[in-house]
């Protein structure tokens, strides 16, 4: 564009800018008017909506009142029918109760008469029994039997004595000759025993001396054994302590060695390095000029390891090479094999970086300054420049607070690192904290590996010392144990010797004592034989035998007399016993009859009391029911009130519809104004944007013209007037701009890439492969979507069908379970059956429609049971388990629940866990769980159908 054209464009932009400003002012005024109209309409619309809300509230109130009156009317009719039925039922029950009461009074009178007669007969039988027992003296039988028994015993004793005397007389005649021979032999034996007894004394003395010597030797050896035992115990404890110490040290050494081996393996395999660095180090033999990572050539004091690790960061994994040629060859190798990226430090190229002396001097004046990081480490001399390059500008401080002060003192010119690894960066930003898992860097791992190697070497020396100590202690222990075992063997041998000698001595003493006892026995036997021979003679034995014969004869006579008396007594006792048994049986029968009559009397009395109470209860119920019927609300009055409310409802509805129409029109006008306002605001925004754009173009063009004129004046000495007079059409700025663009395009093209064709082929192959995978995924997605749609359609149809059946059954079963009312199942979102919820709306007799959550506990339970019965009615099941489902129901509804269970009993088997008698009455079989013993349960079952059959 020429300069003349620019002047023309400037004038055109000035005109456009003027028009844009006028349009902005016009749109601003229109927007203000529209906002005023909108606000006025908004206030009026708020008042109308408040009126609509008031009318809605009134309409809701009158509608609720109408529903309440209708419910009362329906409830009143139902209650009248129910109460009339109850009145007839109670009247019939009262008449039936009166009849039963009369019958029971007659039965009770007869039962009392039977009890009196039975008591009189029982008293008469008891008197007869007492008289018989007085006549029968049964105590004579055992007395006579005992006397006969004693006579028999005496008789047998006399016979035994008679036999003994006969034998003794016969033996006495035979033994009188042998007696003299036995006495002489006994005396000779006594003399022999005396001689044997005298020979024991020297043997006892010799053996006692041997026992004494053995005891002395054994005592001395036992003392020696005790001392050796103490030494053995102490030495064993010393060996155990030494071995425990050695094992503990060995365990620590093994752990340290294992950790060192792990770290060495980690270092040798370069697993701790980045992927690029690790791959380069693994193939370092294939390249020349590779020294290794920076971390391998650093030596750091343990105190500074954390700080240096933080200061270096990833630089610890930079690889040192000899020169740029080696670095270039390594990078080409990494690129061609796609081994990752790596940073290389050529020794011939890297130059040191150092802090200004003034900054170092200022940092040293702050407490906590430790030094420059490069001064705290050592590296080989040839890597001095690399050391200064990496750490020559990093300051080390002891704590973070001091690091902050040092950074402030040197005006945040360089990085300051604390010993715990917190960093104050150049510029003042801070980096710090700690990770949940402490990941160790390469430098820390190297430092720890060096410490572990030193520790394992030191532990190896200590282990060698402890092994020598343990070996010495075990040798001493073995020596003591050998002496101890020898002493034990000696002690055992001496003990056995002493025991044998003691046994021999004891045996000699026992033999001596036995000989003495034998001697005494022989002497005593001789004396007794002589006394017996002197005191016993044959004449005495014959006289004694004659007395025994007479006693035997007298005893036999007494036995015969007592046996005759016993026979007579037994006959009389048997006669009285039969009479007593007969009367006793009659008494037992009378007692049973009396107990039976008394039980009947109690039962009849109890039934009579219950019937009287039941009759009184029926009278009270009858009176209450008549009073309720008298006080019942007239349904006609309720109908008139309903008509009045309906008329008022129509009036309010008409007013509400009129006001809603007004509000709807106002809403439409408000929306129209709002849209108009938004449109004008959008136009205003566009106009303002266009104004700013035109203004910016105008300013840029003005500045450009001024600069161009200035350049023309300076370079070619051409003024604005000259331009107006000339006819130039070339643009210097445009030419200069095109030249710059062409140069930039050439630079962006860069050198020719020879591998571009192969790279394009690889990328193209991968593109087509991914494109095919994408198409496969799209096909799978479409197939899956189609399958899901079919499943959704099937589920929707089946759900709709089942829901309609259950809803219809629920409405019918509800009326049967509640004795009236209405109920329905409502879908919360009928348009989306897959996500819809189900709302249970019920209207119990005498109440309005309400949600399940607003019902009482008993109503909720009965409604839930109703829904269960509805589901079973639609789709019967083989069996159903109910766990105290009717617990919240009153007796009347519990009975209704049980009867409904009975109704489904032919198709479904119900297993009901319950404590309600109303439910148990309708059961076919009852099962009860009892615990007669702690921890032992027992099942008791009763089949009510069989029981009813047996009763009937």
Image: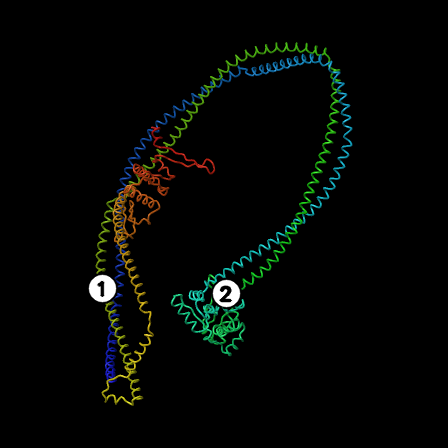
* Residue labelled with disc 1: 668
SS at mark 1 in the image: helix
Display coloring: rainbow
Q: Report helix, strand or loop for mark 2.
A: helix
Picture quarter containing residue 139?
top right
The reply to whether residue 708 is visible in this rendering is yes
Q: Nearer the viewer, residue 450 or 541?
A: 450
For the residues carrying marks 2 and 1, which lies nearer the camera in this image? 2
Q: Which residue is mark 2?
A: 444
Above-or-below relation of 429 to 612: below
Whole-percent x and y of residue 700? Answer: 29, 80
Task: Give the Cα separation between the discs numbered 2 and 1.
Answer: 76 Å
Nearest the camera: 783 or 324? 324
| Nearer to me, 882 or 952 | 882
Instruction: Tell me: 777 left or right of 578.
Output: left
Where's residue 277, x and y in %? 44, 66
**Residue 606, horizontal then vertical, whole percent:** 40, 30
Q: Dividing the picture into quarters, in which one does residue 109 lie?
A: top left
Residue 515 pos. (x, y %) = 74, 27
| Identity of the residue drawn at 61% across and 52% down | 240
Q: Residues within 10 Å of mark 2 (few under 14, many from 20)?
A: some
Image position of 375 with respect to 798: above or below: below
Which numbered tag is attached to residue 1? none
407 horizontally vs 19: left or right: right
Q: Residues within 10 Å of mark 1 (few under 14, many from 20)?
A: few
Left-right relation of 684 to 185? left
């Amino acid at each position: 564009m020429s300069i003349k054209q620019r002047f023309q464009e400037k004038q055109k932009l000035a005109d456009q800018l003027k028009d844009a400003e006028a349009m902005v002012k016009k749109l601003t005024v229109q927007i203000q008017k529209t906002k005023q109209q909108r606000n006025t309409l908004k206030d009026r619309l708020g008042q109308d909506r408040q009126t609509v809300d008031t009318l809605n509230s009134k309409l809701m109130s009158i509608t609720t009142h109408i529903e309440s009156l209708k419910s009362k009317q329906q409830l009143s009719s139902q209650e009248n029918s129910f109460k009339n039925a109850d009145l007839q039922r109670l009247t019939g029950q009262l008449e039936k109760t009166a009849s039963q009461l009369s019958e029971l009074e007659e039965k009770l009178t007869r039962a009392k008469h039977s009890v009196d007669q039975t008591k009189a007969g029982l008293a008469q039988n008891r008197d007869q029994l007492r008289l018989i027992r007085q006549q029968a003296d049964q105590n004579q039988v055992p007395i006579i039997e005992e006397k006969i028994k004693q006579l028999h015993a005496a008789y047998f004793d006399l016979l035994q004595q008679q036999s003994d005397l006969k034998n003794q007389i016969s033996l006495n005649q035979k033994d009188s000759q042998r007696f003299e021979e036995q006495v002489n032999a006994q005396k000779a034996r006594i003399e022999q025993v005396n001689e044997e007894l005298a020979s024991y004394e020297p043997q006892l003395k010799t053996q006692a001396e041997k026992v004494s010597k053995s005891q002395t030797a054994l005592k001395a050896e036992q003392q020696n054994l005790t001392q050796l035992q103490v030494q053995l115990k102490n030495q064993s404890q010393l060996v155990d302590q030494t071995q425990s110490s050695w094992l503990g040290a060995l365990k620590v050494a093994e752990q340290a060695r294992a950790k060192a081996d792990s770290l060495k393996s980690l270092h040798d395999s370069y697993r701790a390095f980045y992927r690029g660095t690790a791959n380069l180090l693994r193939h370092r033999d294939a390249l020349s000029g590779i020294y290794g990572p920076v971390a391998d050539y650093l030596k750091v004091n343990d105190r500074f390891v954390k700080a240096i690790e933080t200061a270096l960061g990833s630089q610890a994994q930079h690889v040192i090479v000899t020169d740029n040629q080696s670095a270039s060859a390594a990078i080409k190798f990494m690129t061609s094999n796609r081994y990752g990226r790596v940073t290389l430090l050529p020794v011939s190229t890297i130059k040191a970086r150092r802090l200004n002396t003034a900054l170092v001097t200022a940092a040293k004046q702050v407490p906590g300054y430790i030094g420059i990081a490069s001064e705290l480490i050592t590296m080989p001399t040839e890597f001095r420049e690399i050391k200064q390059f990496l750490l020559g500008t990093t300051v080390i401080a002891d704590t973070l607070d001091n690091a902050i002060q040092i950074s402030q003192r040197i005006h945040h010119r360089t990085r300051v690192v604390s010993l715990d690894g917190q960093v104050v960066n150049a510029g003042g930003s801070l980096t710090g904290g700690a990770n949940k898992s402490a990941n160790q860097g390469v430098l820390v791992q190297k430092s720890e590996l060096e410490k572990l190697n030193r520790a394992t070497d030191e532990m190896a020396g200590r282990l060698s010392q402890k092994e020598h100590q343990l070996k010495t202690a075990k040798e001493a222990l073995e020596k003591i144990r050998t002496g101890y075992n020898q002493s034990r063997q000696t002690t055992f041998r001496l003990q056995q010797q002493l025991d044998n000698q003691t046994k021999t001595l004891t045996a000699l003493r026992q033999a001596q004592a036995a000989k003495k006892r034998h001697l005494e026995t022989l002497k005593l036997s001789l004396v007794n034989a002589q006394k017996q021979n002197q005191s016993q003679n044959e004449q005495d034995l014959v006289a004694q035998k004659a007395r025994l014969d007479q006693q035997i004869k007298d005893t036999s006579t007494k036995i015969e007399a007592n046996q005759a008396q016993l026979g007579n007594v037994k006959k009389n006792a048997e006669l009285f016993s039969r009479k007593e048994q007969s009367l006793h049986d009659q008494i037992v029968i009378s007692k049973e009859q009396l107990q039976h009559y008394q039980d009947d009397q109690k039962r009849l009395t109890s039934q009579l009391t219950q019937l009287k109470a039941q009759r009184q209860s029926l009278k009270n119920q009858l009176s209450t029911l008549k009073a309720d019927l008298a006080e019942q609300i007239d349904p006609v009055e309720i109908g008139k009130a309903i008509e009045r409310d309906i008329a008022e409802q129509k009036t309010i509805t008409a007013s509400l519809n009129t006001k809603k129409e007004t509000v709807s029109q106002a809403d439409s006008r408000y929306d129209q104004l709002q849209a108009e306002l938004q449109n004008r605001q959008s136009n205003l925004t566009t106009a303002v944007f266009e104004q700013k754009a035109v203004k910016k173009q105008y300013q840029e063009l003005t500045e450009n013209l001024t600069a161009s004129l200035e350049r023309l004046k300076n370079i070619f000495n051409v003024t604005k007037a000259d331009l107006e007079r000339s006819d130039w059409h070339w643009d210097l700025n445009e030419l200069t701009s095109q030249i710059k663009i062409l140069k930039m395009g050439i630079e962006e093209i860069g050198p020719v890439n020879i591998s571009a064709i192969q790279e394009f082929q690889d990328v193209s192959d991968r593109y087509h492969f991914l494109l095919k995978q994408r198409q496969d995924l799209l096909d799978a997605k479409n197939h899956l979507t189609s399958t899901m749609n079919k499943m959704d359609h099937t589920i929707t149809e089946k759900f709709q069908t089942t829901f309609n059946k259950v809803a219809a059954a629920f409405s019918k079963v509800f009326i049967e379970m509640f004795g009236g009312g209405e109920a329905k199942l409502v879908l919360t979102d009928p348009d989306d059956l897959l996500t819809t919820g189900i709302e249970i709306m019920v209207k119990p007799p005498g109440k309005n429609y309400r949600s399940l959550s607003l019902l009482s506990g008993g109503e909720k339970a009965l409604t839930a049971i109703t829904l269960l019965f509805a589901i079973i009615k639609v789709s019967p099941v083989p069996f159903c388990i109910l766990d105290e489902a009717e617990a919240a129901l009153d007796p009347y509804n519990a009975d209704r629940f049980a009867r409904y269970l009975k109704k489904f009993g032919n198709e479904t088997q119900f297993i009901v866990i319950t404590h309600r008698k109303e439910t148990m009455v309708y059961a076919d079989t009852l099962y009860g769980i009892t615990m007669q013993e702690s921890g032992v349960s027992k099942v008791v079952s009763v089949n009510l159908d069989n029981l009813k059959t047996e009763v009937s």
